[in-house]
Image: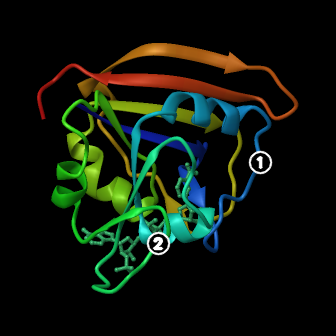
Amino acid sequence: MLKSLIVAMASNSVIGDKGEIPWKIPGEQKMFKEITMGHTMIMGRKTHESIGRALPGRTNIVITRQPDYEAPDCIVVHDLKSALQHCQSDESEAFIIGGGQIFQETISSADRIYLTVLPREMPGDTYFPEFSESDYEVIKSNFIDAVEPYHFYIYERIHEN
Ligand SMILES: NC(=O)c1ccc[n+]([C@@H]2O[C@H](COP(=O)([O-])OP(=O)(O)OC[C@H]3O[C@@H](n4cnc5c(N)ncnc54)[C@H](OP(=O)(O)O)[C@@H]3O)[C@@H](O)[C@H]2O)c1
């Protein structure tokens, strides 16, 4: 099973501000939905609360240290290892969808990174961690010239982690 990160960040690596994503990119959410549909998504408790509900058509796994935490229609786990163990045996690709803390804890072991980059800086309080680009091959690189233009890359690991 591939372990993939999927993220949208500004050019200064900001991914969030005050519990939210500080931009809306038309078309980008549709792409997120298409990529993740039918798969397992693993997220931190704060990201789950920022989305506000389980996203349909996908297995939603929420990680928290709170023993009694409840999230309707989601699987609640208390560490990353359990999150990965909850993936179905026939799952081909599990998506880590954020936020900052969970990306920080998984970046060094990611097989793929689906990365949207806004070509401008944004103020914020949550960042995508640095990663070693030389450990990856860029297998897709698109510039989407829309109302809110953005780059979309897929990085695939070429060096063992
Ligand atoms: N731009 C994007 O693509 C994108 C994607 C996702 C999220 N975001 C943004 O990122 C921000 C949220 O990120 P964040 O870093 O604040 O929070 P987060 O990573 O979503 O969630 C952090 C929480 O996850 C739990 N957690 C983290 N590591 C754990 C571990 N090893 N074991 C057990 N539980 C663990 C803890 O929950 P408890 O406190 O309950 O114990 C922790 O407080 C928001 O602004 C959101 O909008 C942006």
Q: Which residue is located at x 83 percent, y 25 percent?
A: 146
In depth, the one of 24 and 86 nearer the eye is: 86
User: Is 78 placed left or right of 13 in the picture?
Assistant: left
Q: Residue at x 61, y 16 (%)?
A: 142
Residue type highlighted by circle 2: Ala
Q: Is residue 44 left or right of residue 18?
A: left
Which disc number belongs to residue 71? 2
State if disc 2 and disc 1 touch (CB < 8 Å): no
* x 60%, y 36%: residue: 33
Identify the mark nearer the N-term, 1 or 2: 1
* Secondary structure under the numbered disc 2 in the rendered image: loop
In this view, 156 is above or below 37: above
Task: Identify which amino acid the numbered label 1 is placed on.
Answer: Lys
Residue labelled with disc 1: 24
Residue 143 placement, left or right of 62 = right
Q: Quadrant of residue 79?
A: bottom left
Residue density around tag 1, few if under 14, some if 14–19, many if 20 or more, within 10 Å: few
Task: Decide if ligand 1 comes within 8 Å of the CB at mark 2.
Answer: no
| Image location of residue 66, percent across then percent down | 32, 84
Q: Which residue is rendered at x = 27% and y = 57% of the image? A: 105
Q: Position of residue 92 (x, y in %)?
A: 28, 27
Image quarter where the N terminus lies is top left
